[in-house]
DNA sequence: TCGTAGTTTCAGAAATTACTGAAAATTCGG
DNA sequence: CCGAATTTTCAGTAATTTCTGAAACTACGA
């Protein structure tokens, strides 16, 4: 399966982007191919689409599975594995957010809490304590919000975002002692 | 300036995390040191804190400046550059978000739009077109929201997040028919 | 049980990225 | 303009990551 020129461009861009997120270029490209494909593809189709080695594709797919970004399916009477991305783009975005949270935010929160339990903690400078505690509070704030929000569908989200924008304008008029002036 | 053991742990963790974001380990560590420091530090203080070469610190600081994550100041009668992070953690978070948006989201949106203007676009499969357009719409939705929200202070944000959580619960009860569809 | 069609693993090669020390450049007081 | 203090650049090296081909493995039908 040769890739149409337009798909090429898309795939290349997602390769670059993939590299900026924990995955590598090839993994990003594999994902892009699957994302545009009409139907689930088997590993060899990805090999010819991208021109990389079979084993590289195998490893890439494993990586994508560990991110829960691809789905595996079987066709009756065919021994091959077929891979696809969810049809619902919103679901993809939520999976990505979830994964990044659990790979980056959660471990950071764990470390911050551990530091505060550390026997050395009391002889840390007040300033450093304050920064550590502030960071902890902020991450907890976001985590709680995320827990509340996880699982909204795109339709509801759209309404919430509009509400948020509107609310932020309204709040800008309520003079509060701590609030900085709105733009 | 030898780092206290507790700072060590913090710094090491941020090195790992920095590596997951576009920066590398050393850049993350430099940032962590500055984040905990009572007052602005000069490059040589970072060198002794981290035990890496002077030139590595120089490059790391340049990288951090390109992300706009550090501030540079001068002390009268001292020729050295002193670096610090903003006191307001929220400001730091917003800077990070802004930078990542402009390095990842904006270029992606540009590519998606270019694809749609491409002379090949009309002979792309309907399915691929649909996916490209869906992705474009979703990114635009977030970008608009972000534009509305950029610049809220942490205090207002806290209220907005609560509002969002509450609203999402309320909306869950409203039987929705044709909801806000900007599509 | 064997053979075939497929997938995964893994050691080493290739490519990329990070780090260093030395040299060059900059800045500023005198 | 000189020289001392500092920062930046850069070519080469070190470390890390990615990719490959060959071999090992798995599942299945005959």
Image: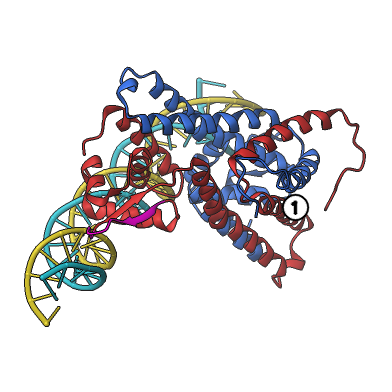
Chain colours: A blue, B red, C cyan, D yellow
Counting from the top left corner in percent of width and height, residue D5 is at: 15, 59
Q: How crowded is mark 1: few (under 14 residues within 10 Å), some or many (20 or more)?
A: some
Quarter holding residue C29: bottom left
Chain of the residue displaying label 1:
B
In this rendering, the answer to whether B6 lies above or below A37 is above
Question: SS for tag 1?
Answer: helix
- In this view, the residue in front, B154 or D28, is B154
- Residue B183 left/right relative to B139: right
Quarter residue A151 falls in: top right
Residue A10 in the image: state x and y as whole percent: 62, 59
Q: Name the residue under label 1.
A: B134
Magenta span: chief secondary structure: loop
- Residue drawn at x 61%, y 38% is B155
Residue A116 in percent (x, y) is at 40, 22
Task: Read off the magenta span.
Answer: B70-79
* Residue B73 placement, left or right of A5: left
The answer to which of C13 and B30 lies nearer the viewer is: B30
Report the residue at 73% width, 51% height from top: B141
Quarter of the image for the N terminus of chain B: give it: top left
Question: Does A37 appear in magenta?
Answer: no
The residue positioned 63% from the left and 47% from the top of the image is: B152
């Amino acid at each position: 399966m040769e890739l149409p020129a337009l798909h090429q461009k898309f795939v290349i861009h997602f390769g670059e982007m993939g590299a900026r997120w924990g995955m590598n270029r090839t993994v990003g490209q594999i994902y892009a191919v699957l994302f545009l494909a009409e139907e689930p593809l088997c590993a060899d189709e990805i090999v010819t689409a991208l021109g990389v080695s079979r084993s590289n594709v195998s490893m890439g797919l494993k990586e994508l599975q560990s991110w829960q970004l691809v789905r595996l399916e079987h066709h009756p009477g065919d021994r091959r594995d077929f891979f696809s991305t969810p049809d619902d783009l919103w679901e993809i975005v939520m999976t990505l957010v979830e994964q990044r949270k659990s790979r980056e935010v959660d471990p950071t929160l764990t470390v911050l809490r551990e530091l505060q339990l550390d026997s050395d903690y009391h002889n840390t400078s007040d300033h450093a304590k304050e920064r550590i505690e502030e960071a902890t509070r902020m991450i907890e704030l976001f985590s709680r919000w995320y827990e509340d929000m996880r699982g909204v569908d795109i339709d509801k989200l759209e309404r919430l975002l509009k509400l948020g924008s509107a609310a932020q304008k309204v709040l800008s008029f309520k003079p509060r002692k701590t609030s900085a002036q709105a733009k």
